[in-house]
Image: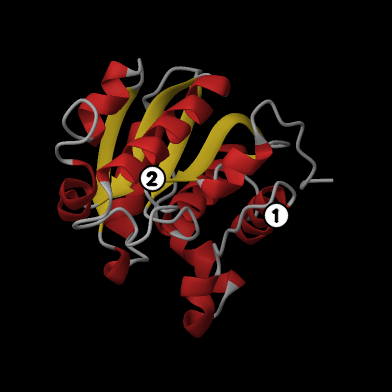
Amino acid sequence: MAGEVSASWNIQDGATHNFSPACSSKARKLFVSAVPGGDVPGWGLGEADMGLRMMSMTSWLDLMHQCKIKHVVCTVDAEELSKKFDGLCDGNFEKTCAGAGMAYHHCPMVAATWPSPPGLAECLRVLRGLPDEHVVICCSDGRRIAPAVSAAWIALSREEAPSAVAEAVEQCAASVGCSRYVLQPFTEKGGEEAFSGFAEEVRL
């Protein structure tokens, strides 16, 4: 089954950060996650308790270490990153990832403008240039942008139907207590067919 996962990390911590393999049966080294802070009241923004934010970051970094993540592809826009992470740990999210031994790749997208073909194209360009190492794709909540990017990447690189891969990505996450809504932003535009068309716009 596409949704079956053999976990090498703490499942409860993974669910806290909406972290899971993108689709373990199709892309063994690709993962999807929310950025740290989603478990903090106020989503880690503004005056949220610094101690709680530090704990969230530490928990997230531990997950990355457990899964041997070497590359972080972050789709969160610069303004949100600044509000959540400036002054935290090594100073910001990029420096903190680097301090933990992970290469950081920023492909910013604004959630309100998703789906974004140029944004997807940039993410795929970055993924195409990475070595064969463990990668996590992050968005604000791990539910829409990051899993959609992962589904498009898997579908196009393996020449599989994007809609079928999107379903497999959602099932894989659900099997370890996480949630993905790859197709939800495309519902009003035709659902599965709309997502397939969107992915094909940015073919490798």
* Picture coordinates of residue 152, whole percent (x, y): 51, 50
Q: How is the image coloured?
A: secondary structure
Residue 72 seen from this side: yes
Q: What residue sits right under mark 1 in the picture?
A: 174
Q: What residue sits right under mark 2 in the picture?
A: 35
- Which residue occupies the foreground of this view, 40 or 98? 40
* Picture coordinates of residue 63, whole percent (x, y): 52, 29
What quarter of the picture does the C terminus occupy?
A: top left
Residue 21 seen from this side: no
The residue at the point 43 percent across, 28 percent down is 61
Is residue 54 found left or right of 190 in the rendered image? left
Binning the other alpha carbons within 10 Å of mark 1 as few (below 14), some (14 to 19) or many (20 upward) gives: some
The residue at the point 60 percent across, 56 percent down is 162
Is residue 33 found left or right of 67 in the rendered image? left
Disc 1 from disc 2: Cα separation: 18 Å
Is residue 76 found left or right of 36 in the rendered image? left
Q: Name the kind of residue labelled 2 in the image.
A: Val
The residue at the point 40 percent across, 23 percent down is 130
Q: Name the kind of residue labelled 1 in the image.
A: Ala
Is residue 65 found left or right of 27 in the rendered image? left
Label 2 residue SS: loop
Label 1 residue SS: helix
Q: Is residue 148 above or below residue 113?
A: above
Looking at marks 1 and 2 on the same chain, the residue that comes earlier in the sequence is marked by: 2
* Picture coordinates of residue 176, whole percent (x, y): 71, 46
